[in-house]
Image (tube, grey):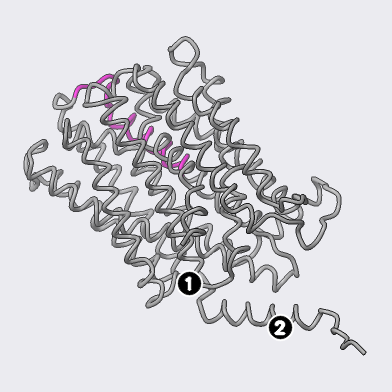
Amino acid sequence: MRLKVIHGFGAAAFGVKDSGFSFFLLIYYNQVLGMDAGTVGQILFAALLIDAVVDPLLGYLSDRTYTRWGRRLPWLYAAPIPLAIAWILLWSPPGGDAPSAGGLLAVAVAVRLLLSACEVPSVSLVPEITDDYVERTTLFRYRYLAGWLGGLSMMVLAYTVFMPGQDGLLEADGYAAFGICGAVIMAVSVIGSAWGQHSLVAGLPEHKPGPLSFANAFAEIKQAFSERAFLIFAAGGLAAYITQGLTFSISQYVNLFVWQLEGGALTAYPLALFLSVIGMFFIVGPLHRRFGKPKSAVIGSLGAAAFGMTPYLLFVADLWPEAGTLVSTLGFYAFLVLGNMLGIVVMISASSMVAEIVEAYQERTGQRAEGAFYSGNWLVQKCATGIGIFLTGQIIAASELVTRAQPGSVPGAVLNEMILLYVAASFVLAVVCAFWLGRFPIGQAEHEARVAALRKAADATEPPHRLPR
């Protein structure tokens, strides 16, 4: 239990970043600083493309790090402080005004790369700690629980302390303190988790890697990413993560302008998300044991879309209670809890699948590449989050929502346009996600047989022990 908690604690940094990028960043730069929503989405997407080139190299370097503290810990001690500084700058532009496009791009790239330098080595420890099919799911449950707690804590603080109420989200004053608080949580979680696992994972790696070569690096990355199981995961995972990025980045818009949440109702939003996380914690294990990870992902993807989009379709059809009333708010939160709970099941299923690819690649090539595959997972996730934010920016621009709009004054035609574009994109992505993740080729029986074969092969290569005379 100590290991589960300490290992998971490191994911709180990702939760802080995800909450900030997904829920607050677009509305801060668009509605508060006055930048065009489509332009902000394009800048963040450009940062993602730069990140796409560097992320696999970080995984490769993590795999080939050779120190007395092992392959992962040096990264987890070195990256968090620079990450915290970059995070503060993101929420405190010099002069307090909107930065230039180049300035926002530079800070966004720095945050993404430094977070990768924390998250990729941390999550790569999972297949090193255990090769058990079920135990890996358990470790990911605790990672996701800690990540969501980190992100939801920042949401609660945002709604109650830093930017309370509808007006608070549209004022610049609280965002600087929001950034500082998040930076502290990021640094403490990553360094604290690394220190807590130090005695378990520190030590010279079993094999010393050869000299670094960027040509060899890209060749090995290409070989790893050509693994059939990884390509199937990437196709389904990309759709799942785009859905999450789209849903989270558009949430502030729909919460304020569609559902007209304010005061206690708005503050209850992170509570509803927390209830969905608790529900996930108890259902994902039984789902994996009964249906396996691929079928669980299918159930989660289609179920999340069905529950999540129902309130919006009823709203457009004028079959939903009046927005802003208690009945409307409670009904929206009930569907949100169920939809988000199943959505997280998809994320855990996909992340846990990557761990099984490690042994499949080892069987084929004789090499382990945890960092490469989890940098690939991280790359897919960040690309998808960026695409989701980009789509939100285009949806907001296409619906012609004006900057500094006031809740309750937005024309119904604008809201309906926003909702229909959002619902259409969500259903398409859900089907794509279910189609590909449902075809993931590694089940529990195949994984356990492969692990047993690898152990037998390793035992056969060990020199025989001589009995003393």
- The quarter of the rendered structure image containing the C terminus is bottom right
The three-letter code of the residue at mark 1 reads Val
State the residue lying farthest toward the top: 95
Left or right: 194, with 71 as reference point = left
Residue 363 falls in image quadrant: bottom right
**Within the magenta stretch, is there residue 332?**
no
Front-lying residue, 221 or 366:
366
Q: Tag 1's secondary structure?
A: helix
Residue 389 falls within the magenta-colored stretch: yes
Please say if 171 is above or below 393.
above
Give residue 335's position: percent from left, percent from top.
Answer: 20, 53
Q: Which residue is most to the front?
A: 469
Q: Magenta span: helix, strand or loop, mainly?
A: helix
Q: Nearer the viewer, residue 423 or 339?
A: 339
Is 303 left or right of 355, judged from the image as shown? left
Give how far across and how far down residue 426 sits, in percent: 33, 50
Mark 2 lies on residue: 456
How far apart marks 2 and 1 lie (CA) works out to: 21 Å
Range shown magenta: 385-406
- Residue at left offset 45%, top offset 26%: 180
User: Dot 1, how many residues are within 10 Å of its Cα: few (below 14), some (14-19), or many (20+)?
Assistant: some
Image disc number at residue 134: 1
Residue in the foreground of this view, choosing between 332 and 264:
264
Q: Secondary structure beneath disc 2?
A: helix
Q: Along the polypeptide, which appears first: circle 2 or circle 1?
A: 1
Please name the amino acid that badge 2 sits on: Lys
The quarter of the displayed image where residue 347 is located: bottom left
> Few, some or many C-alpha atoms within 10 Å of disc 2 (few <14, some 14-19, many ≥20)?
few
Q: Is residue 104 above or below residue 309?
A: above
Depicted 389 relative to depicted 3: above or below:
above
